[in-house]
């Protein structure tokens, strides 16, 4: 797809480069005499002693920080603390960070969510890719809008009942077997629970504001359980075991349906369930018998079944 000037959005760079010091490739002990001296410093509290007392954001991603230890004058004004990809194993040292609205401790070695109950101003909390086995310690964070706990060891959705302001919940790549304990989250707009151990879609009937649901890479066999979620715009159930396209009649606001790599085989079901969805513009059905049995006819048949469609898999059919 190109813009009015004919540009397709891709930046093309000539695939070659000139190495100005090729000897560095052959000599592991090579050093550049013109390079400035390198000084190793410890990333401790002394590094931040002269930090502006009105600092609102600190980002220390991809270091080797093993403990949270900041001078109190910095902590008092901080709104956003980003310690993504470090070596932190215990959540401690946050007593003075009472004004935080965003805390990112993703890609660390944390096993328990602890010592953050006093951070009542948090709106965004990230614990992605740790070693957490339970959702705990967040009950008092009632202003949270976004909670990300993907890529951990969580087996059960629990202790979220008080988080009534929550709009986004990300739980992908855990060990969750059931959708439950979500009834109180009536402001939830996005729920991602990909790559877990679900066998069905349940427990969502009270989530009337849900707009995006991601349940790909599970073991789901049918799409029942969505009858109350009429505000859904995006539904991704790719890489499951769904054999029939049904139970979608209430989803009149649907814009994107991702159903690749299931067992869908009926174009009649596609037409029956999706033809009346006026906002539906994108569908993914590749990897289903719909596509694998007659790949040459597949896209034309989908287009006939859903005339309003603009994208089938990665192929755009027309420009809006």
Image (cartoon, rainbow, N blue to C red):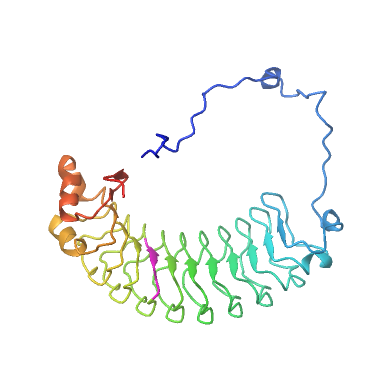
What residue is at 82 percent from the left and 24 percent from the top?
34
- Which residue reaches farthest front? 4
Report the span colored magenta: 209-215
In the picture provided, is 210 more to the left or to the right than 152? Answer: left
Is residue 58 inside the magenta stretch?
no
What residue is at 18 percent from the left and 58 percent from the top?
270
How many marks can you see? 0
**Residue 300 seen from this side:** yes
- Which residue reaches farthest left? 268
Where residue 102 appears, as percent x and y from the top left, is 64, 65
Q: Nearer the viewer, residue 26 or 184?
A: 184
| Quadrant placement of the N terminus | top left
Where residue 12 appears, as percent x and y from the top left, is 48, 30
Q: Nearer the viewer, residue 22 or 274?
A: 274
What residue is at 63 percent from the left and 62 percent from the top?
110
**Residue 293 seen from this side:** no
In the picture provided, is 236 more to the left or to the right than 182? Answer: left
Where residue 248 appears, as percent x and y from the top left, is 24, 68
In the picture provided, is 270 more to the left or to the right than 46? Answer: left
């Amino acid at each position: 797809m190109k813009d009015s000037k004919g540009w397709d959005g891709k930046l093309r760079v000539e695939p070659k480069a000139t190495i100005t010091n090729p000897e560095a490739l052959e000599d592991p002990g090579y050093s550049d005499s013109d390079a400035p001296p390198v000084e190793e410093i410890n990333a401790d509290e002394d590094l931040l002693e002269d930090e502006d007392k009105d600092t609102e954001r600190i980002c220390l991603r991809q270091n080797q920080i093993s403990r949270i230890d900041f001078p109190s004058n910095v902590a008092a004004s901080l709104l956003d603390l980003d310690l993504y990809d470090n070596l932190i194993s215990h959540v401690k040292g946050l007593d003075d960070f009472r004004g935080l609205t965003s805390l990112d401790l993703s890609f660390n070695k944390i096993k328990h969510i602890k010592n953050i109950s006093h951070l009542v101003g948090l709106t965004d909390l990230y614990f992605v890719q740790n070693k957490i086995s339970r959702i705990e310690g967040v009950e008092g964070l009632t202003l949270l809008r976004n909670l990300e706990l993907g890529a951990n060891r969580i087996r059960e959705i629990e202790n979220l009942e008080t988080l009534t302001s929550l709009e986004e919940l990300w739980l992908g790549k855990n060990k969750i077997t059931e959708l439950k304990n979500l009834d109180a989250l009536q402001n939830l707009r996005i729920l991602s629970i990909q790559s877990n151990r679900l066998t069905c879609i349940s427990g969502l009937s009270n989530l009337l504001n849900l707009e995006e649901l991601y349940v790909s890479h599970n073991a789901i066999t049918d799409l029942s359980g969505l009858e109350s979620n009429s505000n859904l715009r995006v539904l991704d159930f790719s890489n499951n075991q769904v054999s029939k396209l049904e139970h979608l009649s209430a989803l009149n606001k649907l814009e994107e349906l991702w159903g690749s790599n299931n067992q869908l085989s009926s174009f009649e079901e596609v037409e029956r369930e999706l033809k009346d969805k006026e906002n539906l513009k994108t569908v993914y059905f590749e990897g289903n018998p719909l596509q694998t049995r007659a790949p040459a006819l597949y896209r034309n048949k989908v287009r006939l079944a859903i005339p309003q469609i603009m994208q089938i898999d990665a192929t755009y059919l027309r420009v809006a």
